[in-house]
Image (cartoon, rainbow, N blue to C red):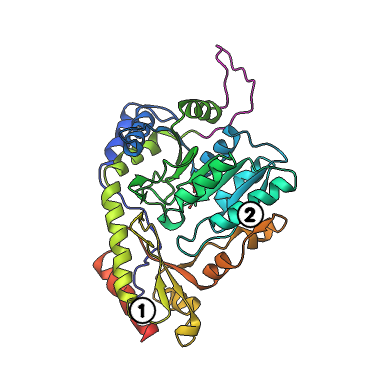
Amino acid sequence: MKKPKIYLSSPHMGGNEISFVNEAFETNWIAPLGPNVSGFESDLATYLSSAGESCHVAALSSGTAALHLALILLGVKHGDEVICQSMTFSASANPIVYQGALPVFIDSEPETWNLCPIALEAAIKDRIKKGKKPKAIIAVHLYGMPYQVDEVTRIANHYEIPVIEDSAEAMGSTYKGKKCGTFGAISILSFNGNKIITTSGGGALVSKNKSHIEKAVFLATQARDQAPHYQHSEIGYNYRMSNVCAGIGRGQMQVLDSHVQRRRQNHFFYKQLFDKTNGVCIFKESNEHYYSNHWLSCVLIEPKKTNGITREDLRLALEKENIESRPLWKPMHLQPVFVNSPFYGGEIAETLFENGLCLPSASNLTSEDLNRLQDVIYSVFN
Ligand SMILES: *Cc1c(COP(=O)(O)O)cnc(C)c1O
């Protein structure tokens, strides 16, 4: 008999989600507004705010919608250019094109796999020289690993270009003790089914600037002017989060910290497993400033050092045992759809993509699951 499938990153309910959802049914708030939406927003704001700094939150239908609205709020229009980390999920870059703007892709640096500050600055200088200053920088905390926040922020401030912080994968991660999701002029979160917490599908836009949040909510509810009839002076969107989904989110907030701990334990499990394997390198924090939620545990496999064993060998061996794993994000500058976008940097992202593999990382992996994983990994490398 086939063993049950182990997924890369499956949803993990804490138990109380259903009471919030029931409440939505009992009170008939089956709409993209209601007490769960406000409650979830306030939970998120409390979670992200710190002593000297309050964050405001708009709950939306997806992280992608949040990115789209972030670009609109920053005034990105047809013909503009927006800088974006190349190594990421396509959802980071697609909204640039929704706005009719051009994505300018930047290579990764090898420590955090995120935006390379050197390539970033070179790109900004070159784009300005070519006549167009980029309107925004989309920086991503890939797999939960914070990007080089100080460096990226310094460069962005120097050239006065706002950062959109794509924190879709990084809830619960910190940089120098400060939470990811609080570093950008605008930050976004995702609660898709595979993320650290989920509302089945959903996202949020976060900002310290309250007027950004008010404008985001206005645009997300069809940009309706204040009038008894429906009147519109701007193009709007239907991007608000449903009150039913927000109920799931409120329950998930109660287990966020334990989810992060479980994901981190998975990372340490793999770390110990691969510790003595030549040519396999686990993706980890490069120093104490970084604290990753390890949303996905990733390894780099260098065939030159593993007697020719590649990441595909490991992926296929896992697949044979009904275990899902996945190559790293294919960089955007290598995607057919983005062939016409400029790219700045070298081959860091490309090499990561060639050698990297994401391993099962859900917060509800059982010890039985981990044993199965260990067996396959040992059989490939010993
Ligand atoms: C998941 C994800 C998004 C998009 O979020 P959705 O809620 O799926 O729309 C954006 N950026 C990154 C890096 C992601 O992983």
Residue 341, quarter of the rendered image:
bottom right
State the count of labels.
2
Would you say 262 lies left or right of 167 here? Answer: left
Q: Residue at x 39, y 43 (%)?
A: 199
Q: Which residue is labeled 1 in the image?
A: 376
- Ligand 1 within 8 Å of disc 1? The answer is no
**Amino acid type indicated by mark 2:** Ala
Can you give x and y, in whole percent of width and height, for residue 240 in the image? Answer: 48, 33
Q: Is residue 224 above or below residue 76?
A: above
| Residue at the spot of label 2 | 122
Magenta region: 222-239
Q: Position of residue 306 (x, y in %)?
A: 44, 84
**Residues at marks 2 and 1, CA–CA distance in whole angstroms:** 44 Å
Residue at 71% x, 43% y: name it. Answer: 132
* Badge 2: residue crowd in 10 Å (few <14, some 14–19, many ≥20): few
Which sits in the foreground, 356 or 222? 356
Is residue 226 located in the magenta-colored stretch of the structure?
Answer: yes
Locate residue 58: give its quadrant.
top left
User: What secondary structure is marked by label 1?
Assistant: helix
Q: What residue is drawn where x is 27% and y is 74%?
A: 371
Label 2 CB-ligand 1 distance < 8 A: no
Q: Amino acid at mark 1?
A: Val
Labels 2 & 1 near each other (Cβ < 8 A): no
- Tell me where residue 227 appears, x and y as whole percent: 56, 12
From what the image shows, is residue 324 above or below residue 13? below
Vertical comparison of 232 with 71: above or below: above
